[in-house]
Amino acid sequence: MGWGPLRWLGSADVDPQLKPAKERLWVLPDDQELVDWVDALAAHRLPTLLVLPGGPRLKAEAALHQALLNQAGVPLLGLLQVGDSWDPQQRRADNLAWLGHWQPGDRQALNLSGPLAILMRERLLQLDLS
């Protein structure tokens, strides 16, 4: 079973009144600012997976963006680190909703029956989307 239809969002779509068509997932590319989209995500109670590039600012960016989503009432599926080395001990110490890590090029990790997808589905079932 897949995630269903998705929609890539762009700057032309920024509008707090934006409504989902038949999509079950909106994808926000890294050239878009989360702060511009948080109202639309909150208004429609869309489950959100926050994907962040690894690097020296990872912890600060993750904490800032998770706080923004929580404050707006956006149902947060979790955070996914892309690239760089994964430090599970440090990520646990962050006390954030980390789902895990993905290295670009690792197609198996994104398989819908893989561990990451299973964890995402479990978190989705735990969210209050009302």
Image (tube, helix red, strand yellow):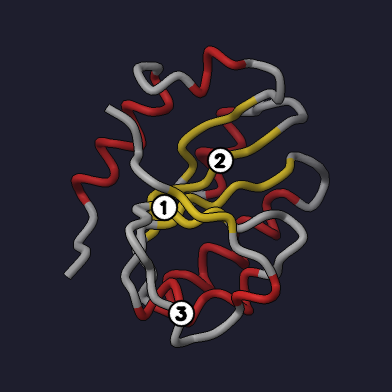
Amino acid type, label 2: Leu
Q: Position of residue 40 (x, y in %)?
A: 46, 78
For disc 2, the neighbor class at 10 Å (few under 14, some 14 to 19, many from 20) is many
For disc 3, the neighbor class at 10 Å (few under 14, some 14 to 19, many from 20) is some
Question: Alpha-carbon distance for marks 1 and 3?
Answer: 14 Å
Residue, disc 3 = 18
Task: Please tell me whether mark 1 sits on a helix, a strand or a loop.
Answer: strand
Of the two numbered discs 2 and 3 on the same chain, state the one appearing first in sequence.
Answer: 3
Extreme right residue here? 56
Q: Image check: 46 left or right of 56?
A: left
Question: Alpha-carbon distance for marks 2 and 3?
Answer: 25 Å
User: In percent of the image, x 67 and y 76: which residue is there?
Assistant: 12
Q: Quadrant of residue 75?
A: bottom left
| Foreground residue among 50 and 62 | 50
Q: Position of residue 114 (x, y in %)?
A: 40, 17
Q: Image check: 58 left or right of 109?
A: right
Residue mark closest to the camera, 2 vs 3: 3
Residue mark closest to the camera, 2 vs 1: 1
The quarter of the image holding the C terminus is bottom left
Amino acid type, label 3: Leu
Task: Please tell me whether mark 2 sits on a helix, a strand or a loop.
Answer: strand
Residue, disc 1 = 25
Of the two numbered discs 1 and 3 on the same chain, state the one appearing first in sequence.
Answer: 3
